[in-house]
Image: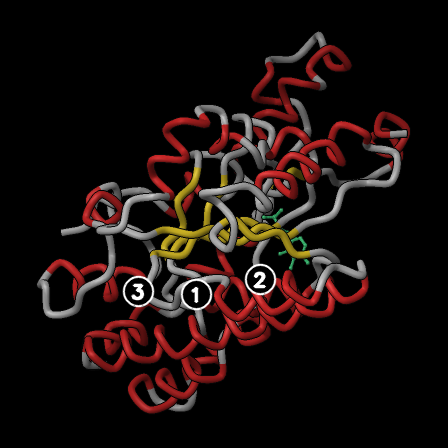
Amino acid sequence: MTILAMNLAAYCNGVSKLHGEVTRKMFHYLYQNIPVEEVPVFSVTNGIHTTTWLAKEIRDLFDSYLGHHWSADVSNKNIWEAIDKIPDEKIWSTHLDLKKKAINFVREILHNQKNRNQESAEEIRAIEEYLNPEAFTIGFARRFATYKRATLLMRDRERLARLFSDPERPIQIIFAGKAHPADRSGQELIKQIFDLSREEPFKGKIIFIENYDMNVARHLVQGVDMWLNTPRWPMEASGTSGMKAAANGVINCSVLDGWWPEATIGKTAFPLVRKLVIAVRKNRIGMMPTTCTQSLKIK
Ligand SMILES: *Cc1c(COP(=O)(O)O)cnc(C)c1O
């Protein structure tokens, strides 16, 4: 079908620069008489509709400090200069509010989920203690296609247990996603995460929520501290969820795959993330592990 479509289409493009390159290599065999760079596949990098994914609280901040017209011209770099006028404390407190909101949202979903599965009253009561608003919170939500490697973090179980039991630097991770009904290995990944979420020391700290959709995505990309993306390079065509996180000032921790190489030349292109990280660096506000800020090459 792909070849049929390529032969019938007037124009053919990948969904990121890297994806264009990968696709030209993949289909070079159909155009053996020309160099690989000339295979007629171009690229148009996927994007997100910024205001759909932005938390209202962040939008209000932008409205106050960037001027009301910022959203009509989101790619205008000059407008983003004014990001430095937002006080660090204000960004941080907005982020913490969004984090609390996301945690409450996840608890509510878990409540419904466990009720539906007829779990014990004790199990359901325990949800109140799940997720710590003070802990560094990682989000991982997407389709559970195997190349996205949702369980990569779990390969070294002992190390994982150590990370999740550190009382000085508490961490937690929220997973959400679906696998295709015919994708047995994708479903197996979900089972692994689900089983782990019921074991100590991960209970209440590794969370899996069902029925991933835009509403779940919105709460997570707005309210976690770090968005995690670990696809097997170079298989991620674009992967837009990291854009949604970064627009909300959430750090995108990602393999250099899909759209991400285009955003990480020099310093990150997302002004709010840069601002948040600089604020943390100045040490006026706590709570962001330094390893995380160091990995971003930000002045
Ligand atoms: C953004 C989004 C995706 C795409 O996420 P990737 O990281 O590109 O896999 C998938 N599903 C939902 C509901 C989304 O909002």
Identify the amino acid type marked 3. Pro
Earlier along the polypeptide chain: callout 1 or callout 2?
2
Marks 1 and 2: CB-CB under 8 Å?
Answer: yes
Instruction: For marks 3 and 1, give the CA distance.
Output: 8 Å
Where on the picture, by quarter, is residue 199? top right
Rendered location of residue 131, percent (x, y): 46, 62
**Mark 2 C-beta closer than 8 Å to ligand 1:** yes
**Residue depicted at x 25% and y 82%:** 90
Q: Tag 1's secondary structure?
A: helix
Instruction: For marks 1 and 2, give the CA distance.
Output: 10 Å
Q: Tag 3's secondary structure?
A: helix
Earlier along the polypeptide chain: callout 3 or callout 2?
2
**Mark 1 C-beta closer than 8 Å to ligand 1:** no
Q: Which residue is mark 2?
A: 48
Classify 275 as above or below 192.
below
Local packing at callout 3 (Cα closer than 10 Å; few below 14, some 14-19, many 20+) is many
Image mark for residue 271: 3
Rendered location of residue 268, percent (x, y): 30, 51
